[in-house]
Each structure stands twice: as structure tokens, then as C-alpha cells.
Amino acid sequence: MKRRLSRIGALTAAGLAGCIFATAAMPEMARANDGYDLWLAPSAAGTAVPDVKILSDSPTLRIAGDELRRDLKASALPVVLAKADDPALASLRLATAGMGTEGYLIRPATIAGRPSLLVTGRTDTAVLYGAFAVIRAQRTGADLAQLNVASAPKVKLRVLNHWDNLDGSVERGYAGQSLWDWWTLPDFKDQRYTDYARANASLGINGVVLNNVNAKPESLSAAYIAKAAALAEVFRPWGIKVYLSARFSAPIELGGLKTADPLDPQVAAWWQAKSAEIYRAIPDFGGFLVKANSEGQPGPRDYHRSHAEGANMLAAAVAPHGGVVMWRAFVYAETDPDDRAKQAYTEFRPLDGKFADNVLVQVKNGAIDFQPREPFHPLFGAMPRTPMMLELQITKEYLGFATHLAYLGPLFTEVLDADTRTRGKGSTVAKVVDGALDGHDLSGMAGVANIGRDRDWSGSTFNQANWYAFGRLAWNPALSADVIAREWAEQTFGADPRVVDAATSIMMESREALVDYTGPLGLAHLMDTGHHYGPGPWVDDLARPEWNPTYYHKADRNGIGFDRTRTGSNAIAQYAPAVARRLADPRTTPEEQLLWFHHLPWDWKMQSGRTLWEQMVSQYDRGVTTVERMQAQWRDVKGLVDEERWNKTAAYLQIQVKEARWWRDASLAYWMSVNGLSLPTGSAAPAHELAWYKAQRFPLAPGQAH
Ligand code: GCW
């Protein structure tokens, strides 16, 4: 596996010296803090205003200047913000090659006879990103006088997907109502829209899909285009474009046509006119995101047309305006008896080379659905002629909603680092996604947002780190999860190393703990129906076969796991031969993916020498004890973190301990009912009978589909 870059390695071209952490807790830690300021709470409170100059004027540069004035220590070197082609910089002969339109350069320079820190880039947005990089460097202890940094994003479209409905609810949202108050838009532009844009810009996120992929046609009506335009206006100076999810059948529902067949000239004309209408209101509109022929959504397959034909028709409508289409590959059908994990590949792989130039195919990290752990999706690397956009889920639909602490940095980097072997060693998902592997200029990463109207935006303080990690990795997929965790903690809680160390350590073990207590060793999709919150490995009565947990684990008296080798669904054949060979044999399959690919007897010998059953139980136990340790570590920093955020986190960890036990107990009770085995000595019996777990109901759990 390649070495991941540390923050310093990633940021600096010429070295970043002096990473010294201040030892005293910061003064604001004492006061109440509801988390609204995210990782951007002002750190340099003081009366003297720092010396910040902007060499030309634009709304974006003014914002960049204000950010630095608000945050920089007054003692810092004077800072000059300028576009790279500013005549005042001509004598510096800046190396702008490789900067692209969004990359920035920060370095000491003498400008107009004054030693200064120069922040520059080829566009206003690049300079804004540079300003945020200076703030981040200061807040993470760098010596600004020594700052010498060149950084450009590896991925072009760094986009949040909001699954926000027009009625204010958020599908799989656990942080309150939608941020967008559609009712009062476009007339009222809530300050939160600006604060949201600021947070995104601080990470380099440059696109926002406003509405749910399960889209309502009304989102493309004139009234809602005007509302989207109002948001676009707020976001524009922050370098953020808006996109809309498009319902494929909108020509019927909105346009009164009889069909939405993509090859029907009237349908194409409708979309062209609709696109022109959108671009009149939003000249820099990003384009459409489409969920087609999946989970009941309409699409080109309704007319026996391919996904490429559908995508290309829309792509032609936005192409004259510079827009793109992000076409999702999250496609499976209950009428297809084949392994669900195979269906997207089967459908999309033959379409490679058939998509228009401005189409990206958006692929979830794994082949099922945002489970706590999935092997990488076999489509990565399998469609070299198509830009493949990675879709990650920041909101924790299957990872304990907002209450469980699960830092997703390790989940994100696990998939980015995975080697598809499609072009020999080192063909990582990151290189597929950033376009480097197959020479694509167009590239993208999407994160399903975890943002709502809660004061702390993401439902909990630590969930903010998942938004943060997504943004940082979309800018540079080679960053490491623990460096991002530390960087986030320093900015969020202040520089006290006791807090930063505890937060980082808690974060770094949290996701693995959740995997352990919800479904270790490659098990997946074990949650209860509808809300996807608690355990439901017994569920076997849902209409669609592949919605039932029993479809995934296939446990019986003799064994457990989904056979995806040649003796089973042969899904492994969708991977490159070097990967498939390794996965064909349970002894060479990574143990954390074992039951994803193999059906094995309960007494299968694991590397530890334990039987499969003993190993499973020990991992369920380990999941619970890890959460207990996370709780103890948080207790140790009581008084070092402001009370409001400390208390809420402590209460949530208490919920998590309780629910980790619930997951463990319910799962073990069920597995024992299937395999007839008893628990290894030392492992506690479940607190209740299986029937008790089965009887739990959560009809009003948040985030359910509308
Ligand atoms: O995981 C499933 C979710 C649905 C979601 C779908 C998708 C937006 O349970 O709520 O719908 O994935 O990604 O389209």
C-alpha cells in the first residue's frame, strides 16, 4: 500500500517548519460553545487588526481579506492577497504551472518594498482557498513567517449531495430539517446559507446538489429555479456552484409530454429548453445529478434505452452552457435474480466509451450500499473511458445516525487506497477517481451531506469531522485519516495536546469499533427495516429479496456468509484478475472481508487459531469494549473542553455504549438461534431473549424516506 501523505507533506512544496503546538488551553474553551462555528471559531481574538492587503477588488477577494483579518494574529507578517497575474507580482516570476484554476501558492515575498506573506493563485477562488490554508496553518501551529506552500486540488468537482426534500425533510438526515427553507426562498436569504458556504469554501468544496436524488419534478419548476438561483447567488463568491437532481420523467410531469423517452425529439427539446431556462437564472449552474431506474425512480430503461442514452440526452442539453451530468450507477432491480452486488457492473461496464464527454458516472464506494465496511466497487478501474465519480456517504445512515461516534476518515481512505489492479499495481481507486489513471481531465468526488438545521449543523460535534474529512480528501485523496483527524481536532477544540490526542485517538478507533459491534468479518446489511438504525439480522419478510438481511448473511446451522466465488454468484470475477485470484480463496481474502466473499462453516479456522464463531464473538465483544474505552478517554478531558460540547458528546457516547451492547447482544442471540452454538467462556450472555430484540420498533426514527 502506498504511503499516505501527512498534512505537512501534502501542503508544502518547500517545507513547512515549526509545527509547535501551544500548550495552554485556548480562552474560548471556557465559554459555552454550541458548535455553530465548526472548525472555524475565531482563534486570534485581539484588538489589533492584522495587516492584510488585497491588490484588486472582487467579492471573493474581499471575503478572503475579511477571513484573514478576522482570524490572523495581529503579530503575523503583513499578508498580501493577489491574483497571480497582478502586475505587482510580475518581478517575482511565480511558478504558476500546475496550479490550475483553483490551486494556490503561499510564500514569503517582498512586495512594494515590504516583507510580506503572499497568497496567490490564478483565480479569485484560488486566492480564497489560499487564505483558508493560511488560517488552517496558523490554527494547527505552523510558523506563518516560514510558510511556503503550493497546493492544487487533485479532483475537479468536489461536491456535496444533499438528499433534501422540498418539504424540509432530509432523507437519511439526522441533523434536523433541511438547511434550505424553500418556503421563504428566494426572498429571504438566511445568514446560515453564507455560513454554510464559508465552511465549504474553507475545505475547497466547490459544488452543492441542492435536492434529493429521489427527486420531485417541482424542483425544476420556475418557482424552484428561482429559489435555487437565490442560493447560487449566496454561494457564488465562495466558489460554489449549485447543481440539481433531475427527475427523469419531468417532461411528463412538468411538461405535459406523453413520454420521457430520451430518444424522442420532443423530450430532448424539453430538456434543452429547461436547461436554457435554468442557465438564464443561474449562469454558472453546474448541471444535473440523476438517479435513474433504481428503487422506483424513472429512467431510460423504462423506454428500453440504455443509461448512456439517457445520460447523453441530458448531457447534450447542458453542454452548450458548460454543464455536466452526474449519472449514478446505484442501480439494481428486484426483478434481477443475480447477486445485487453484481448488477451495477453488469449494467454499466458495457457502456464504457458510450457516454458523452460531459458525463461522469457516480459510483458508491462499495457495490451494495454505504455499509460500515464494503470492499471497493468493481466498477472502479473497469470503465477507463469514462470519468468515474466516487460517491461517499457522510451522513451515517448505517453507522448509528448522529448519535454514534464514528469518524469516517478511515472508511474514506480505505476505499481511496484500494488497489483495483486494473492497470497493474498502484491502480488505486484514488487514481481512478482523480482521473490520473486514465487521463481524464474531468473528475469528481461526491459526499452525501450530513448537514441540517441543528445548531451544530451535523447532529454532533464529531460528525462535523466527517464533513471536514470529506472536503479535505476531495482536495487531496492522498491525505491520511489520522492527520485529518488531528488537524480537525486542533481547529475544533483548540491546541491543548491532551484534548487533541484524546479526540484523535477516539476518532481513529471509532469506525472499526462500529464495524465490530454491528457486523464484523465482512458481514453487511444486518440492520432493521426502514429506519436502518438497530439490528435486524433475522429480517426475511420484505417484498424485495435483496432488502432482507438474510439475503446477505445466508446463515444456517452449517455456516455463514455470501459465496461470491465461482461456486456462488462469482461476483469476484468482476474484479481484475490479480484481485479476483486473492479473493477466490478464503485463506487469501482479507479477514475483514471474509464473509462478504465466502460462505464458511462456523468452525472455520481463523488466522488467530480461533474458530470463525469464536472470532466473531470476540469482535462483537471488542466493539463494545472499544466504545467503553472511547467513553473513558472522553471523560479524561472533562474540563478541558467547553461544557456544552463536552456534555453532549458524553451523553451520546453513553447512548453508543448502550446501543453497541444492544447490537452485540441482539446479533449474538440471533446467530446462536441459527447455529445452535453456545458462547465461548468469558463472553457474557445477551441481556434479553431473541424475541425481545425482534419486538423493538422505531416507527418515528429520523431520516426515513418520504
Ligand atoms: O441507501 C439507500 C438509501 C436510500 C437512498 C438510496 C440511494 C436516496 O436507503 O434512502 O435514496 O440509497 O442512494 O439512492
Image (cartoon, rainbow, N blue to C red):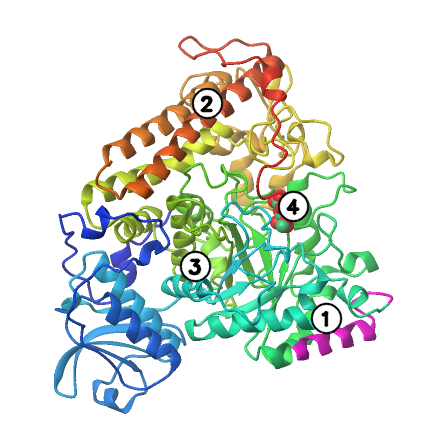
Crowding at label 4, few (<14), some or many (≥20) Cα neighbours within 10 Å?
A: some
Quarter of the view holding residue 329: bottom right
Residues at marks 2 and 4, CA–CA distance in whole angstroms: 27 Å
User: Is residue 375 at all visible to an observer of this figure?
Assistant: yes
Q: Nearer the viewer, mark 2 or mark 1?
A: 2
Ranked by sequence position, the earlier of labels 2 and 1 is 1
Q: Amino acid at mark 3?
A: Ala
Residue, x 56% and y 28% (percent of image)? 535
Q: What number is the disc on residue 313?
A: 1
Q: Residues within 10 Å of mark 3 (few under 14, many from 20)?
A: many
Residue type of the residue flagged with mark 4: Ala
- Find disc 3 in the rendering and name its residue: 474
Judging by the rendered image, the residue that carries numbered circle 4 is 705
Which stretch is magenta? Answer: 258-277
According to the image, label 2 marks what residue? Answer: 661
Expressed as whole percent of the image width and height from the top left, the position of residue 398 reads: 54, 38
Residue 40 falls in image quadrant: bottom left
Specify whether 106 is left or right of 543. Answer: left
Q: Nearer the viewer, mark 2 or mark 3?
A: 2
